[in-house]
Amino acid sequence: MKKEIVNKLMNSVMSCDVEGAVKTAEEALKAGVDPVEAIEDGLAKGIRVVGDRFGAGEAFLTELMIAAQAMKQAVAVLEPAISKRARAAKKTLAKIMIGTVEGDIHDIGKTIVTTMLAVEGFDVVDLGVDVPVETFVKKTKELKPDVIGMSALMTTTMLKMADVIKALEKEGLRRKVKVVVGGAPTSKEWAEEIGADGHGGDAMEAVKITKELVRAP
């Protein structure tokens, strides 16, 4: 039953059914489906399929946008349950600051990672989308995070990740913080090239890498 609901969530996003996604998210909560599982194994899988179709020229931009809206509204239904679990979780001393880099307004992947980090007990500060290099530097000085997460969905905007790291180095902040990057056009090789500490290919990997970095001496 629960697996069927998770698959239903995935299919509702794939079929760009906003109303269906919301109703199924409500159904998931009533059925006791793990909200994180509902997002990662249902909604996120659905949006990845639509994203791949769009990248292959098999789907229109409008379809991708409606699918993203379906996912976003469904996540909004699941968030209260996730927030409740996060409050119940034992807080770690690690503070994570995350944002989508300048010129990029995509927030779905970042939102999933932010949600999952919170569930794991991290203190997460979401800077939002289209975050300028200067803001990353300013907020690093102000918030003193243990880890900075940067997301990008376009090859043109992911270059800003390198700019942020260079700016952190210039301000003498780079040694004080770990940096994780992620997003469709990024890779482990890209992370190494720009001097990041880790790369998250998807939300689960991003959380895993963050945990490893925080535990590292």
Image (spheres, rainbow, N blue to C red):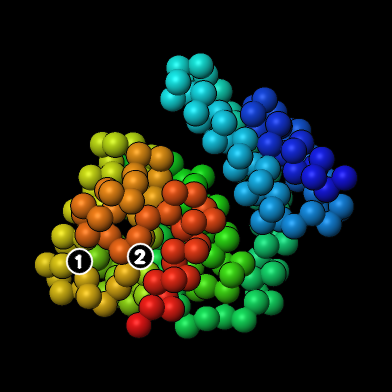
SS assignment at label 2: strand
Quadrant hosting residue 150: bottom left
Most foreground residue, 83 or 183: 183
Residue 48, how many percent across, how many down? 54, 36
Give me the C-alpha separation between circle 2 and circle 1: 11 Å
Most foreground residue, 36 or 82: 36
In percent of the image, x 69 and y 69: which residue is there?
A: 85
SS assignment at label 1: helix
Q: Which residue has dot 2 on it?
A: 148
Position of residue 83 in the picture relative to residue 62 (left or right)? right
**Image height of 4 relative to 188, above or below:** above
Residue 87, how many percent across, how many down? 65, 75
Residue 129 seen anywhere in this rendered image of the structure: no
In the image, which disc is placed on residue 107? none
Residue 217, how many percent across, how many down? 35, 83
Dot 2 amino acid type:
Ile
The answer to the question of whether label 2 and label 1 lie on touching residues, with beta carbons closer than 8 A, is yes
Most foreground residue, 166 or 193: 193
Position of residue 176 in the picture relative to residue 17 (left or right)? left
Q: Residue furthest left?
A: 170
In percent of the image, x 49 and y 28: which residue is there?
A: 52
In percent of the image, x 21 and y 54: which residue is there?
A: 194
In percent of the image, x 54 and y 65: which residue is there?
A: 117
In the image, which disc is placed on residue 168? 1
